[in-house]
Amino acid sequence: MSGPRPALALLLLAFFSGSCLALGLAGEAGAVPQPVGSVALRVAGSPGDDTQLDIGVVILDPGIPADPAIHGERGIFPEIRRAESRYLPVLLRGTLVDAGVWGAVRVLPEVMASAELLVTGEILASDGTGLTLHLRAADATGRTWLDGVYRDEAGAADYPVAAGADPFADLYRQVANDLLAVRERLDERQLLQIRRVALLRFASELSPEAFSGYLSRDDNGHYAPRRLPAEDDPMIARVERIRNQEFLFIDTVDEQYTALFEEMAPTYGLWRQYLRENAIFRAEYQERVQARDSDARRGSFAAMQEVYDAYKWSRIHAQDLDELAQGFDNEVAPTVIEVSGRVYRLNGALDAQYSEWRQILREIFALETGLPATPG
């Protein structure tokens, strides 16, 4: 029994020194914010169709440091973090849909500047004990709805993760409530203007020559209609049809993000659970070391053995998640879409497919109108 102990002790000491910074870390954004606590999702009366804003939730910046040496210090598994950047927006999307006060809520592979309301953000910390996100939301006029750091903590009751649940659901509910609070401060005229500006910004992306005169932009980057096209303008009708084709592609992409979510959920929940158990064991071990009482010395090897066992299982689940994440990157399904009697097949990563599709739509619009195609 005495032989393996020094090697195990060295391994665990290395693990402690490399992992102690992973807990409760808020990245480089500053002090750790207070957890959101227990949050109930607010559900307001559904607005009229004319003022029901669509929301785009962009996949998150995974927040992976460029220096690989820092990954171990912060407990970051790059492939898993990249998968989380696509997994977590699906959870936020589901919460916003449950609120019942928005139009279509879509997960986007990249920023859509013409979205009526766009949510972007970065993962600052993610482990089994806590989740910290820096989230921003702005509407098409350039008005900022939120820009802040959200944190939630998981408790023992959150594990094992039940089907359809998430340990950090309170965070998403708080974000949804904050967005609703901003919408309630806007009147019908302001909400309608957001929708009009979003359409005109999309139109100007398709053809700056035809639509650049419809919008003004002030020094703060805020957009406002300079003039509005006629309701029966055939050019605007084409713009709306092209935009619906873009939404069709995004909805197809959204299905693939949902498939990733459903495939990851069981293993991801177990991995988070083991990370939390590791955190508890590490904290208890550090307390014993600092106290340096006789009981701690006698129990230290047993404590380290528990830490090692939990760490071993977390590594196994991390490897499973790595395989899922890599498989998603390597096996993204081609997207097949028909427009104007032609069938287009897009391959590669989803963000690359999205960029290619947007360029195809610009070219279709140019062919229909005789205007020059706008480069992507």
Image (spheres, rainbow, N blue to C red):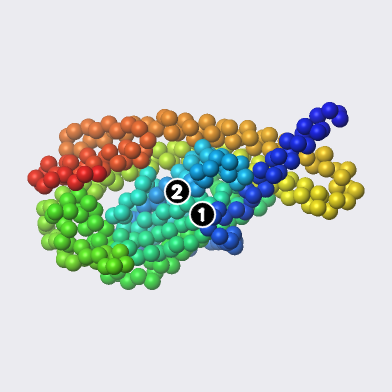
> Which residue lies at the image location 29% right of the left edge and 46% below the top edge?
247
Residue placed most toward the observer, 358 or 100: 358
Q: Earlier in the sequence, mark 2 or mark 1?
A: 2
Q: Looking at the figure, which quarter contains the N terminus?
A: top right
Which residue bears the numbered disc 2? 60
Residue placed most toward the observer, 178 or 161: 178
Which residue bears the numbered disc 1? 133
Q: Secondary structure at mark 1?
A: strand
Up the image or down, 316 lies above or below 201; here it is above
Tags 2 and 1 in contact by the CB under 8 Å rule? yes
Tag 2: Cα neighbours inside 10 Å, few (<14), some, or many (≥20)?
Answer: many
Q: Secondary structure at mark 2?
A: loop
**Residue 12 found in image quarter:** top right
Q: CA distance from mark 2 to mark 1?
A: 9 Å
> Which residue lies at the image location 47% right of the left edge and 30% below the top edge?
327
Identity of the residue furthest to the left in this view: 370
> Which residue lies at the image location 46% right of the left edge and 38% below the top edge?
260
> Which residue lies at the image location 12% right of the left edge and 41% below the top edge?
367
Q: Which mark is residue 63?
A: none
Amino acid type assigned to the residue bearing label 1 in the image? Leu
